[in-house]
Amino acid sequence: MTGAVAALRGAVGFLSRLPVGHTEDGWEAFRRTPAAMPAVGYALGALIALPVVGAALSPVRVPAATVAVAFPAWLYLVTGITHLDGVADAGDAAVVHGDADRRREVLKDSALGVGGTVALALVVVALAAGATAVAELARFSLVGAVLLVVVAEVGAKAATATLVCVGDAPHEGLGSALTGASGPGALGWVALVTAPAALLGWPTLGPDAVAPSLAVLAAAVVVAALAFAWARARLGGVSGDVLGATNELARVVGLHVGVIAWTLS
C-alpha cells in the first residue's frame, strides 16, 4: 500500500465510521499527512449530502424541517460523534475561571458542564438550521445545494488540518500525536488539495458558483484562525478537543455563509 493510499484510508477510518478498517500503517501515514483530511472531505461531503438529495428527488414534498432532523442524524451516523466531544470539552473550558492549567484540567474531565451543554446545543441547532437553508436552496438548485455541503466539509477538514500544521499541543494525547508529526511546511499540500473545491461547481453551474464556494472556504480559514488564537491564549496550544471543535464549527459556519453567499450571488 503506497503512502498516499494508506494516508487516505487512515483519514477515512479516523474521520468517519465507514468500515475501512484500522491499521497502524494507516494511522501513521494519516497523522503525517494533514492534506489527507481535506482530500477525504470531498467524498464525505458527497455522502453527507444524501438526505438533501433524497428530499429534493422525493416524489412527495419533504418539509425542510424534516431535512433539518435527518441531516444531522445522518451526518453523525457517518462521521461519529468524536468531534462533538471536542465541542463539549472546549465549551466547558471556555467558561471556566482560572488559568490555562485549570482549563486543560476541564478538557480532560469527562463530566459535561453548562458550557459544554450550551456549546453542543448551539452547534447542533445551527447545523439543523443550516440544513433547513440548504434544503430550501435544493428546491431551486440541487447541484448548488450539494456543492455547498461538499465544500463546507472540505473546508472543515482543511481548517482542522491547518491547526495540525501550525499548532503545538499543550499536553500528550491525540493533539500531540497529530501536531507533532507535521509542521507549517505541510500547509502548502493542504492548500493544494483544498483549492479545487472552489471550482467544483464551475462545470455545471458556471462562474457564479465560484463566489459561494470561495466564501465557504474563507469562512473555514477564519474559524481556523480564531480557534488557533483562542487555543494558544487560553489553553497554551492545540489539543485534540480543539481540533474536533474546529471541524464542527467550520462546517456549521461554512454552511450558513455558503447559503448567504449563494443567495446574494
Image (tube, rainbow, N blue to C red):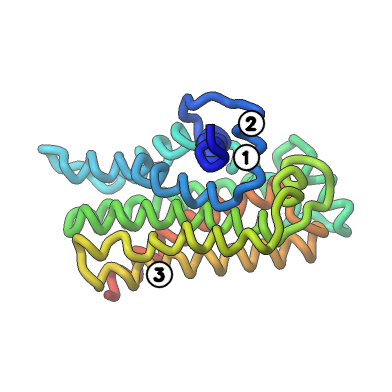
Identify residue type, mark 2. Asp
Q: Position of residue 8 (x, y in %)?
A: 51, 40
Q: Secondary structure at mark 2?
A: helix
Classify residue 256 as left or right of residue 66: right
Classify residue 52 as left or right of residue 195: left
Q: Label 1: which residue? A: 29
Q: Label 3: which residue? A: 214
Q: Secondary structure at mark 3?
A: helix
Q: Gap between marks 2 and 1, in whole Å?
A: 6 Å
Crowding at mark 2 (Cα within 10 Å: few <14, some 14-19, many 20+): some
Q: Decide: is 111 above or below 126.
A: above
Q: Secondary structure at mark 1?
A: helix
Q: Decide: is 58 above or below 94.
A: above
Q: Position of residue 214 (x, y in %)?
A: 40, 69
Identify residue type, mark 1. Ala
Q: Label 2: which residue? A: 25
Q: Quadrant of residue 44?
A: top left
